[in-house]
Image (cartoon, rainbow, N blue to C red):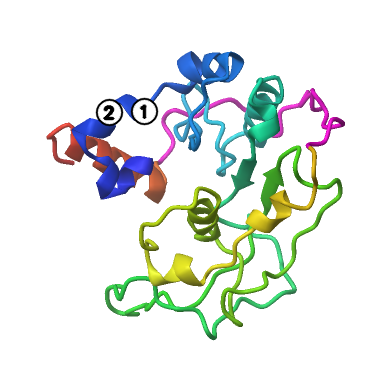
Amino acid sequence: ATLFYQSLRRLKHLVKFHQYSLKFKLHAKWGKLPNYAVIEQRYFDCEMFPANDDHPSHDVARGQRFVKEVYETLRASPQWNETALIITYDEHGGFYDHVPTPVVGVPQPDGIVGPDPYYFKFDRLGVRVPSFLISPWIEKRTVIHEPNGPQDSSQYEHSSIPATVKKLFNLHSNFLTKRDAWAGTFENYFKIRKTPRTDCPEKLPEVTKSLRPFGPKEDSSLSEFQVELIQLASQLNGDHV
């Protein structure tokens, strides 16, 4: 799905994409993980390769086993003491939230307006989503609330990730949009401790029970997101869907 970003759809970036099952664990074991990596789940529910992306109606147990596998791989890596694992979601799962969504002071990212009939301006945030920041440099039981800037109305949101990366790596390039220039960042939470923790668990509890009573349904209707992935792949292959 990172290929939705046009700047990544260039031949020079081909060597930066790797199959998770073949390379991730080896690179982690050898201490050769890159400075920044994005790990993608399996979005399509097939018998041989069941989905593990936590999207309905996929088996959430498989998604949580995937999280466990990624964490334990990083925890065993010689790079662990210089690692931060960010786990976040793009939706809230339909659960009630007592905190109202911010609708004031949120900058429109790039001036693009949605189609009719709503002409949405992207000048508000959606519901809160769960996010986890995992690192030996984070104090135990830390709960991160609202950010301190860069603006009075700033909030933590998905563009906080590239905004934080820009600060951590001291990147001199411009912000991607007005939104990540506005978003709160969390790099200061890595600076509280003087040494990395040594009590981070090496193993997480086993996910022993499937949370749905049936296996993958290969003949089920595709979601809107799955259709968009297929359309993207077809364009990259020179086909048309």
Whole-percent x, y for residue 20 in the image: 48, 22
Q: Is residue 209 above or below residue 239?
A: above
Local crowd size for mark 1, using a 10 Å CA cut-off: few (<14), some (14–19), many (≥20): few
Identity, as a three-letter code, of the amino acid under mark 1 = Phe
Whole-percent x, y for residue 202 in the image: 80, 23
Frontmost residue, 172 versus 183:
172
* For the residues bearing labels 2 and 1, Cβ distance under 8 angstroms: yes
Frontmost residue, 136 versus 191:
191
Q: Main secondary structure of the magenta part?
A: loop
From the viewer's perspective, is 167 left or right of 136? left
Identity, as a three-letter code, of the amino acid under mark 2 = Leu
Query: Is residue 200 covered in magenta?
Result: yes
Per the image, the residue denoted by label 1 is: 17
Residue range highlighted in magenta: 196-221
Quadrant (top left/top right/bottom left/bottom right) for the N terminus: top left
What residue is drawn where x is 60% and y is 71%?
Answer: 155
Quadrant in which residue 90 is drawn: bottom right
Report if residue 108 is visible in the image. Answer: yes
Q: Secondary structure at mark 1?
A: loop
Q: Is residue 57 above or below residue 162?
A: above
Per the image, the residue denoted by label 2 is: 14
Whole-percent x, y for residue 194 in the image: 79, 44
